[in-house]
Every structure is written in C-alpha cells, then in structure tokens.
C-alpha cells in the first residue's frame, strides 16, 4: 500500500491514478484545504479500481501513524504542502509550519511505523537565480522566497535523516512547472480563487472567468521579452513518481529534476493556448514581479539515465488537455 499525502490535489490525483493503473494499492491522505475529494472519486471511476481516502493533516502525527499501521503502508509519496510563492512571502510562518513541521511529523510517524521509503515533492525554486542553464542537480541552491526555502530545508532534513539512519530509501524530485490535465478531461487543476499559475489563469481568460491576463514584465533578456519556464505535463510528472518508487530498492538519497529540458515564454504559452482553444487571450503588460528570473529550465538527463524516464508530451498537448478540462469543468470540481 502506497500512502500519497496531498492525494486529492492537482498533482496528487494524477499520481494516485498512475499508481492505480500500475496495479498498486493506494491510500490518499488530504486535509482538503486546497483540494476536493471529487478528484479521487473520478480517479477511481477512470481506473476501475478503488483507493482508500483518509481526511487528515500531516501535522497530526498520531493520525498519520494510525493510517500507516492500519493500512499496511510500505512507502510514502509526500506531496502535501502549501505552494504559492507570493503567498509565502506574506505568510512565511504558515509555510514553515505546514511544510517543514508537517514533514517532520510525517517522518516521525514513519519511523515509529518502520516505514522507510519516501518520495518527496520538491521544486526547481530551490535553485534560485540560475548561474548557468540548463539547471542540473549540481547547480548551487539558493531559493529567493520562503516557499522555496521550505523545500530546501526539507531536502537538507532528508539528507540528514539518511546520514543518521542509512536504512532509508529517499527520492527528492525537483519539479519544474506542472501543467495540463488527464486526457479524459475529468481530473485537472482546480485553483481556489484567482489562479496563481500561468496556464490556469490563461484558461480562465479563454473561458471568460477572467477578463485578461497580466504579464509581469516584457523586458527580460529573452527573444520576446517575457519570462521563459520549463512546462511539464502533469501526467509525465506523475509517471516520474512511479519510476522513482520502482527504483528505490536500495537505501540512499536520489535527487532528480523532473522537467522537459525545454523552455517556453509567456507569449509562446498564450499563442499555443489560443491555437488549441480557438479563443483570444487578451493581456496587458505589467511590472516585473519581485524574485522572478528571466529564464529557468531543467537538465533532465540524470532522470533519463537513472530511471529511463522522460517527458513525452508537447506544450500544445499540455494546453489542449488543460483546455478540455476547463471546458468540461468551468467551475472545477465545485460544479459537481
């Protein structure tokens, strides 16, 4: 049985689906603060298999321990956490409590239950301002916001954990920019309130929920002046978790980038979304956002060499799949 924390969320629901499709048993844990249990109902319908859901918070060590023991969990994929970069600067202590303290309590429960396999959802934000590109796993680390620092602190904590007890099997996955949705259009990203990320906001502009997109800066040193990021399809990202879990047969710490190795600008994303949706995306140019870098994209070579994993879906497919999700679910899961 695999425990997926944050299992009802955007990435979590796709990871649960990948695990079920691979024939693994899943218990999904979520406090539903930024997610909807309907995602897991749809996952089970799509897979034709059931999973176990537990409504709990990773900061509740006793509840986690009980779930680990009662469900016979053998490994944990840890996705639960707060993730908005801007919000983390406004509420840094909330991020440290939820992300860092929550992970500490999860690990403590795992130790008590003798579960020592963990895949952790980290982020490319741990790299900070790139000193070279593409970003490989050896790039210096220096996050520029509290969210990124929580991810780096957890990475360091996991390395110290292994140094203290070399029976642990630990995978650290540095995500780049997950976008898209399952091709069925039944599960996808369902932000609460105004989206923080580019593609969900663009989709809401296309469907008429938002008036226009505000591009934060068009004077970067890039071909069209807008920021460039590495966008990865969430289904490719989910398959990476399955690959890492299968690889963690021996104790150790494995740190990998999950990205495409390609960068796309904000304007490229807009044009691609317009092409697949047939809808115009009006936008205006605003000021640069503090802490944003001009270009950021992955070197995913190590993941390919170590796991045989690579992303396969194009930006056009990412946009098309997200648009299908948006059209089918104009109000997200709250419309069900």
Image (cartoon, rainbow, N blue to C red):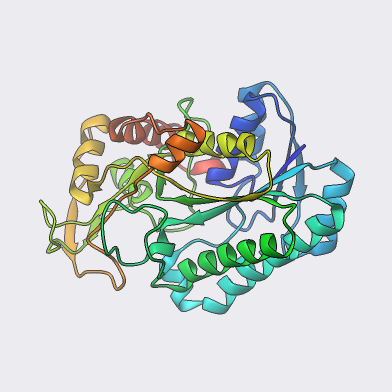
Q: Can you say which quadrant of the picture contains the C terminus?
A: top right
Quadrant in the picture for residue 303: top left
Q: Position of residue 123 (x, y in %)?
A: 46, 56
**Which residue is drawn at the image coordinates 68% and 59% (left, top)?**
162
Residue 94 location (% of width, % of height): 58, 74
Residue in front for this viewpoint, 71 or 249: 249
Residue drawn where x is 84% and y is 52% of the image: 114
Task: Please state if 238 lies on the left or on the right of 251 as rendered.
Answer: left
Q: How many marks?
A: 0
Compared to residue 84, the image places residue 21 above or below, namely above
Residue in the foreground of this view, choosing between 97 and 258: 258
Judge left or right: residue 151 versus residue 250: left
Quarter of image, res 21: top right
Q: x%, y% of residue 200?
A: 38, 47
Q: Does any portion of residue 119 appear in the rendered image?
A: no
**Quadrant where the image shows the N terminus:** top right
Q: Position of residue 103 (x, y in %)?
A: 67, 63
Q: Please report the residue visible at 52 percent of the width from the left and 56 percent of the height from the top.
A: 122
Place residue 328 in its image quadrant: top left
Q: Nearer the viewer, residue 196 or 227?
A: 227
Q: Is residue 18 above or below residue 263?
A: above
Residue 324 seen by the camera: yes
Q: Is 291 or 189 nearer to us in this picture?
A: 291
Q: Is residue 99 above or below residue 66?
A: below
């Amino acid at each position: 049985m695999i425990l997926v924390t944050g299992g009802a969320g955007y990435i979590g629901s796709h990871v649960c689906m990948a695990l079920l499709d691979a024939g693994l048993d899943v218990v999904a844990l979520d406090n539903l603060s930024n997610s909807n249990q309907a995602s897991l109902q749809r996952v089970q319908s799509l897979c034709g298999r059931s999973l176990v859901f537990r409504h709990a918070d990773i900061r509740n060590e006793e509840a986690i321990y009980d779930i680990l023991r009662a469900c016979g969990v053998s490994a944990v994929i840890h996705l639960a956490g707060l993730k908005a970069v801007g919000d983390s600067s406004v509420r840094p202590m909330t991020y440290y409590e939820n992300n860092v303290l929550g992970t500490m309590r999860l690990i403590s429960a795992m130790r008590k239950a003798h579960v020592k396999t963990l895949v952790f959802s980290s982020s490319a934000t741990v790299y900070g301002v790139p000193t070279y590109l593409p970003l490989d796993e050896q790039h210096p680390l220096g996050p520029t916001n509290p969210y990124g620092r929580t991810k780096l602190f957890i990475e360091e904590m996991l390395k110290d954990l292994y140094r203290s007890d070399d029976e642990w099997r630990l995978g650290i996955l540095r995500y780049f920019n997950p976008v898209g949705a399952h091709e069925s259009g039944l599960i996808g990203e369902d932000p609460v309130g105004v989206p923080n990320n580019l593609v969900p906001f663009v989709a809401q502009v296309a469907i008429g929920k938002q008036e226009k997109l505000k591009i934060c800066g068009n004077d970067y040193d890039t071909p069209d002046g807008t920021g460039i990021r590495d966008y990865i399809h969430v289904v490719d990202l989910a398959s990476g978790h399955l690959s890492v879990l299968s690889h963690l047969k021996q104790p150790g710490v494995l740190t990998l980038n999950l990205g495409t190795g390609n960068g796309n600008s904000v304007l490229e994303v807009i044009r691609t979304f317009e092409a697949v949706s047939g809808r115009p995306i009006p936008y205006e140019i605003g000021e640069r956002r503090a802490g944003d870098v001009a270009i950021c994209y992955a070197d995913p070579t190590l993941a390919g060499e170590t796991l045989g994993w690579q992303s396969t879906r194009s930006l056009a497919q990412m946009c098309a799949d997200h648009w299908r999700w948006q059209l089918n679910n104009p109000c997200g899961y709250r419309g069900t």
